[in-house]
Image (tube, rainbow, N blue to C red):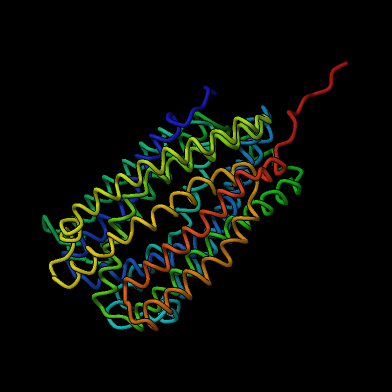
């Protein structure tokens, strides 16, 4: 495997992440031409999907750390065993989650406060996307294997194919062009699912021709109990952090649905779809930094890992702040891509100004937490998340938005306070060096000779 560096890892991840975000952006954009509430319904349903997929991150998140550290330690056989374990358990968990969403999508949406057209549209979407969600679990497992072997460009190209296919099908199925039926939300669901089928097929061929062999599943005999323990030790805290974040956002959505106006809900949907393009560099640099940190910690190059973490953070912060400033300058035009309602445009434009403070904290978390995970330090970020996401973000959203009657502005104040508070704690943790003692990788396996 060729020598890894931040740029070579990060740029394909950046493009892949941008394309992945563009999938959701295009879904919302096309639906905004169909029905504003349809766009908000899909955004609400996707929060349910995000929580459901947290179980997949227990496996994929832990696999990423263990594979990278073992590759760094030159223990390729152990890395292959982790890869086989990741694929097997991802598929099993994905099938369980798909069955649950297939049969209980409507009660879940009712539970979070959806009603009327949002409930109907959201249920239609979850019936198809949720029923085939095991495909996403499988895609996650394959992507982890490919990325941690340094082949980030492959994953990027597959995402490009999925993006093109999803866009074409969105336009035809949602808006009913070229004689196709006008399916609305069902059209988005079909396009999303079909593109995942194609992506899964391509990545399967790549993994088993370029990276691993099907015989790697033989490494699961005898069953690797110690690997399972390590996966749970890493994966559960990491997944819990993601779960708490998505659950807190679901609570916030419930607050918006029940306490705030439709204009607040629509503005929130559009702003979140715009601002995700502000932090895509932070996401890609964070994921690249995690891979590099895992390899460096596995090779016991701890000082180099420390410097790499801050180098990635500095680059991500500069780029994200610059993009946020550009977003502020063109804020009205950006909201105008989606909305024509003057109230929604005004609300969204003002929130984009507040969002720059949120991005300062979010960038810190995306990069430094990724480095901590790559080193195997996963408990501390989760413990911070339990307090910050619920006390500052969720409770703060209710206090500022409802009690103080600040509406959507109150939401963003709470979101920014949460991200900045946790970001400060993460920097202190990285500088403190406790992560240096969290290495999981074993020494290289050798065969004794006489």
Taking the view exactly as shown, the residue that stands out farthest to the top is 450
Q: Residue at x 51, y 54 (%)?
A: 423
The quadrant of the rendering that contains the N terminus is top right
Q: Residue at x 59, y 42 (%)?
A: 374
Q: Is residue 224 left or right of residue 68?
A: right
Rendering coords of residue 75 (x, y %): 68, 30
Foreground pick, 179 / 126 = 126
Q: Is residue 294 left or right of residue 105?
A: right
Q: Residue at x 76, y 43 (%)?
A: 222
Quadrant housing residue 14: top left
The quadrant of the rendering that contains the C terminus is top right
Rendering coords of residue 328 (x, y %): 24, 54
Quadrant housing residue 32: bottom left
Rendering coords of residue 265 (x, y %): 29, 73
Q: Residue at x 43, y 49 (%)?
A: 363
Does 329 appear above or below 254? above
Does 395 appear above or below 226? below
Foreground pick, 152 / 88 = 152
Does 350 appear above or below 70? below
Foreground pick, 162 / 112 = 112
Number of numbered discs on residues: 0
Rendering coords of residue 69 (x, y %): 64, 36
């Amino acid at each position: 495997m060729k020598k890894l560096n931040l740029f070579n890892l990060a740029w394909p991840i950046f493009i892949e992440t941008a394309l992945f975000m563009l999938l959701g952006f295009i879904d919302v954009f096309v639906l905004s031409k169909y029905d504003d509430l349809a766009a908000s319904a899909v955004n609400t349903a996707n929060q349910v999907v995000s929580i459901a997929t947290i179980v997949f991150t227990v496996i994929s998140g832990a696999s990423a750390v263990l594979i990278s550290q073992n590759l760094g330690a030159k223990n390729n056989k152990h890395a292959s065993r982790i890869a086989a374990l990741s694929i097997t358990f991802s598929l099993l968990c994905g099938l369980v989650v798909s069955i649950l969403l297939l049969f209980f999508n409507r009660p879940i949406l009712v539970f979070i406060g959806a009603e009327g057209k949002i409930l109907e549209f959201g249920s239609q979407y979850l019936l198809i996307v949720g029923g085939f969600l095991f495909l996403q679990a499988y895609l996650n497992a394959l992507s982890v294997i490919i990325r941690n072997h340094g082949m980030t460009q492959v994953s990027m190209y597959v995402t490009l194919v999925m993006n093109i296919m999803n866009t074409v099908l969105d336009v035809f199925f949602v808006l009913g062009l070229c004689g196709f039926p006008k399916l609305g939300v069902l059209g988005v669901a079909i396009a999303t699912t079909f593109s995942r089928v194609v992506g899964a097929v391509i990545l399967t061929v790549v993994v088993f021709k370029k990276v691993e062999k099907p015989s790697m599943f033989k490494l699961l005999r005898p069953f690797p109990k110690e690997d399972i323990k390590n996966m749970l030790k890493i994966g559960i805290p990491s997944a819990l952090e993601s779960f708490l974040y998505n659950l807190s956002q679901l609570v916030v959505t419930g607050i918006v649905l029940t306490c705030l106006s439709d204009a607040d809900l629509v503005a929130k949907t559009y702003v979140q779809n715009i601002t995700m393009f502000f932090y895509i560099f932070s996401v890609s640099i964070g994921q690249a930094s995690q891979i590099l940190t895992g390899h460096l910690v596995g090779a016991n190059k701890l000082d180099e890992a420390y410097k790499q973490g801050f180098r990635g953070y500095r680059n991500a912060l500069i780029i994200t702040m610059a993009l946020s400033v550009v977003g502020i300058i063109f804020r009205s035009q950006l909201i105008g891509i989606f909305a024509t309602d003057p109230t929604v445009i005004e609300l969204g434009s003002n929130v984009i100004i507040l969002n720059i403070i949120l991005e300062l904290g979010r960038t810190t978390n995306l990069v430094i937490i990724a480095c901590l995970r790559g080193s195997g330090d996963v408990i501390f970020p989760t413990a911070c998340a339990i307090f910050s996401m619920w006390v500052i973000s969720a409770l703060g959203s209710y206090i500022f938005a409802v009690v103080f009657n600040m509406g959507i502005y109150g939401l963003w104040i709470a979101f920014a306070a949460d991200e900045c508070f946790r970001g400060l704690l993460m920097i202190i943790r990285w500088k403190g060096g406790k992560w240096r003692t969290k290495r999981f990788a074993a020494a290289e396996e050798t065969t004794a000779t006489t």
